[in-house]
Image (tube, rainbow, N blue to C red):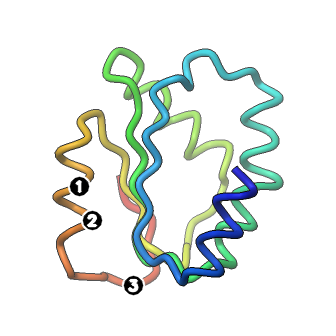
């Protein structure tokens, strides 16, 4: 995941889709690392839209986990959670950038 952050910085990536359907197997330590180490680094990239695709069977539960762990109210990019890749791709392709926000 750190390699992806470096690539996002070097290539000025502004749209990111994280298809993380394996998160039901993630440990509490994984979520701690994501929220305390990786996510603060993501905020320092040029990202404008960040879509997270979660497994359908645990979608509602995982959205809550992410929002509670990240504990941020204002982000420098839009973030949305999806359970279908097609929805995420459509949202990312929509050129509108609403500005700093946290929406679900």
For marks 1 and 3, give the one nearer the viewer.
Answer: 1
Toward which corner of the image does residue 78 lie, by quadrant? bottom left
Q: Are marks 2 and 1 in contact (CB under 8 Å)?
A: yes
The alpha-carbon separation of the residues under discs 2 and 3 comes to: 14 Å
Give the image location of residue 10, x and y in percent.
64, 81
Give the SS element for disc 3.
loop
Image position of 38 with respect to 31: above or below: below
Where's residue 96, x and y in %?
Answer: 22, 82
Q: Nearer the viewer, residue 23 or 13?
A: 13
Report the residue marked by disc 1. Answer: 89
Q: How would you rate the neighbour count of disc 2 (Cα within 10 Å): few for under 14, some for 14-19, many for 20 or more? A: many
Measure the C-alpha gap from mark 2 to mark 1. 5 Å
Counting other residues with Cα less than 10 Å from the Cα at mark 3, is it few (<14), some (14-19), or many (20 or more)?
few
What residue is shown at x 49% (from left), y 35% (from top)? 20
Determine the secondary structure under disc 2: helix
Displayed quadrant of residue 29: top right
Q: Which mark is residue 92?
A: 2
Say which label, 2 or 3, has the lower sequence index. 2
- The answer to whether marks 2 and 3 mark residues whose Cβ atoms lie closer than 8 Å is no
Residue assigned mark 3: 99
Q: Nearer the viewer, mark 2 or mark 3?
A: 2
Going 62% across and 15% down the picture, which residue do you hit? 25
Alpha-carbon span between mark 1 and mark 3: 19 Å
For image coordinates 74% across by 65% down, the residue present is 40
Q: Position of residue 93 (x, y in %)?
A: 20, 69
Q: Quadrant of residue 66?
A: top right
Relative to 37, residue 78 above or below? below
Residue 44: x %, y % from top left: 69, 78
């Amino acid at each position: 995941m750190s390699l992806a952050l470096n690539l996002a910085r070097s290539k000025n990536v502004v749209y990111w889709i994280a298809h993380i359907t394996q998160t039901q197997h993630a440990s509490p330590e994984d979520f701690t690392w994501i929220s305390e180490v990786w996510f603060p680094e993501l905020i320092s990239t040029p990202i404008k839209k960040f879509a997270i695709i979660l497994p359908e069977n645990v979608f509602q539960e995982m959205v809550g986990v992410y929002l509670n762990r990240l504990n941020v109210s204002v982000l420098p990019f839009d973030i949305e959670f999806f359970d279908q890749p097609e929805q995420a791709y459509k949202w990312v392709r929509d050129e509108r950038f609403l500005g700093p926000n946290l929406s679900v």
